[in-house]
Amino acid sequence: MLKEECFSFGRASVVGLAMLAAGGVGTANAQDTVTLGSLSAVTGPIAGLVEPIVAAEQFAVDQINEQGGILGGATLELVVADGQCDPTAAVDAAQKLVHVDRVTAIVGGICSGETVAAAEAVAIPAGVVMVSPASTSPAITDLDDNDLVFRTTPSDAYQGVVLAEISRDLGYERVALTYTNDDYNAGLGEVFREAFTEMGGEVVSEQMHEPGQASYRSELSSLAEGDPEALVIFAYYDGAGITMMRQSLEAGQFDKFVGADGMVHADVVSQLGADSLRGNVHFTTSAQDVDASQFQAFADAMQEHGVDADPAGPYISRGYDAAWLLALAIEHAGSADREGISESLRAVASSPGEIVGPGEWERAVQLLAEGQDIQYIGAAGAHEFDENGDVSGLYSLNTIEDEDRFVTEIMN
């Protein structure tokens, strides 16, 4: 059964977020303050996708403070550091969060490469829990992380298979495959190739590409060999994706495209034109059940508070849930010390327990004070972490048909 909705993207200022990342959000680790870090690519190839995710994280923090704060009245503060969707920048940003801002835990990263690099170089050695709302690379599953790295979005080990199934359902038997040289996109490419081949399809051409090039005409010429029926493109929309699609349309090489969440942005439509894409793009994103009471509570509260972000946009609810889960873990642990946060995170996310949902901070604090177990069911649903810190989840199919924008259908 499919549930349909349309979404748009918030217009929060990238410049404003970058200033927060550079200067911090306030004085960290004051006696009456508990700090969470947000390792987020507020500049770089997916800045437009990241803006509303960070806004949702901040909204979670604001709700908590409006309901009395954390640990008996301390103010919860979100400190944003810019990982730039780049491993080197992410390590620098994580160093600041961990060793300068002295955050208790980190929401993030966003891009898989920044999450892996920051975790291995900084967070894991320092014993700092990370909960990513958007990093989907299968490589994260196998990190030697001492139970410190979690995510509220499912692994691409699932998404790549879903995309292969969609491609076969569309009747594609022969496809070309290209992916950006990074953990997220290359991981998706690997999973897709294996699944599509097992389903009887053939990848007739394949090429890794580097982001940020002015021209991909040579790569596209090679990919077009063998008469593939569609181009499967794993890239960030503003890194290589739009450029590759535009140049392949101009050259008449490809007019049908399959891809993932890094390509779902309004800029794809505005720059390439809805008419050139209508019926010919099929992109997936992780999704949430928009009819669930928890999602509705989150969406209504976002609107009431004037948060400039679409609750159903990519990873927005998952960013909100990541911040909530870490705050609940700190409250459960009874301390802002880093030790013990991992165990408490699993405790507040797992059944059995009294269910608490988005916005129910005062109730959660009261239940914990009474010694009761709780389970947070968030805007994106339950987050029952497996032994690797992974979760399952829903996916949506994003297409352009009658509307001049992406329309999202939840796949059950």
Image (cartoon, rainbow, N blue to C red):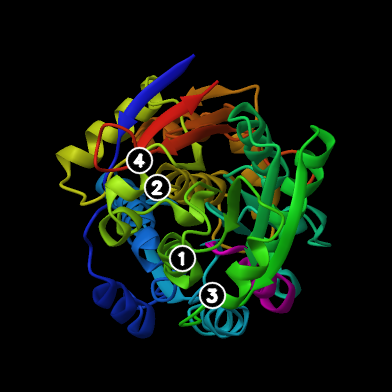
73 relative to 44 in the view: left or right: left
Identify the image quadrant of residue 270. bottom left
Magenta span covers which residues?
Answer: 108-123
Q: Position of residue 124 (x, y in %)?
A: 73, 69
At numbered mark 2, what does the secondary structure look like: helix, strand or loop? helix
Residue at which label 4 appears = 278
C-alpha distance separating marks 3 and 2: 34 Å
Residue at which label 3 appears = 217
Toward the viewer: 409 or 34?
A: 409
C-alpha distance separating marks 3 and 1: 9 Å
Residue at which label 1 appears = 251
Q: Position of residue 258 (x, y in %)?
A: 55, 46
Q: Which of the two discs, 4 and 1, labels the residue nearer the N terminus? A: 1
C-alpha distance separating marks 4 and 2: 26 Å
Toward the viewer: 145 or 84?
A: 84
Q: Does residue 111 lie above or below 163 as drawn?
A: below
Q: Which of the two discs, 3 and 2, labels the residue nearer the N terminus? A: 3
Q: Where the C terminus falls, by quadrant?
A: top right
Image marks 3 and 2: residues in contact by CB distance under 8 Å: no
Disc nearest the viewer among 3 and 2? 3
Q: Which of the two discs, 3 and 4, labels the residue nearer the N terminus? A: 3
Disc nearest the viewer among 4 and 2? 4
